[in-house]
Image (cartoon, rainbow, N blue to C red):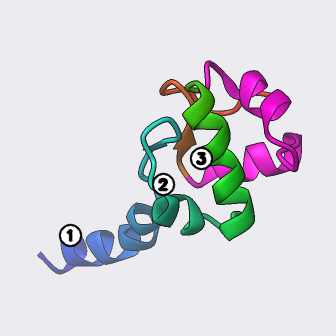
Amino acid sequence: MRRRLLLLLASLPLLASAAKPLELNQATQAQLESLAGVGPDLAERLLKARDARPFESWADLRRRVTGVGPKLAAKLSDQGLRVQGQPYKP
């Protein structure tokens, strides 16, 4: 019993660090701003571009929104952001 409890406690940090997926085409401004690297200005640019038409892919996102390069795309994807259900792949 004690061993199982120790294993469970040891696995908690791994469970807590797992990023919950967040679909960019459905995310709210507050959800976007909760991501490290996204402030109010970037969140507004993302939402404005999305209002014009939904993002088709990460490449589409990077073309249409200034300030989203490969490093930021990877960082956002690592936090669970998805475009059409897909993580960023360089």
Crowd class of label 1 (few under 14; some 14 to 19; many from 20; radius 10 Å): few
Location of residue 24 with respect to 28 vertically, above or below: above
Location of residue 2 with respect to 61 vertically, above or below: below
Mark linked to residue 84:
none
For the question of whether residue 39 can be seen, the reply is no
Residue range highlighted in magenta: 55-79
Q: Earlier in the sequence, mark 2 or mark 1?
A: 1
Q: Amino acid at mark 2?
A: Ala
Task: Quarter of the image for the N terminus: give it.
Answer: bottom left
Crowd class of label 3 (few under 14; some 14 to 19; many from 20; radius 10 Å): many
Q: CA distance from mark 2 to mark 1?
A: 25 Å
Question: Residue visible at 32% across and 77% down?
Answer: 9
For the question of whether residue 50 can be seen, the reply is yes
69 in magenta: yes
Mark linked to residue 4:
1
Q: CA distance from mark 2 to mark 3?
A: 21 Å
Q: Amino acid at mark 3?
A: Leu
Q: Amino acid at mark 1?
A: Arg
Q: Earlier in the sequence, mark 2 or mark 3?
A: 2
Q: Earlier in the sequence, mark 3 or mark 1?
A: 1
Are the residues tagged 2 and 3 within 8 Å (C-beta)? no
Q: Nearer the viewer, residue 36 or 26?
A: 26
78 in magenta: yes
Tell me if 59 is positioned left or right of 6 in this view. right
**Quarter location, residue 44:** bottom right
Location of residue 52 with respect to 75 vertically, above or below: above
Crowd class of label 2 (few under 14; some 14 to 19; many from 20; radius 10 Å): few
Mark linked to residue 19:
2
Tell which tag, 2 or 1, sits nearer the viewer: 2
Q: Nearer the viewer, residue 61 or 79?
A: 61
**Quarter location, residue 62:** top right
Mark linked to residue 47:
3
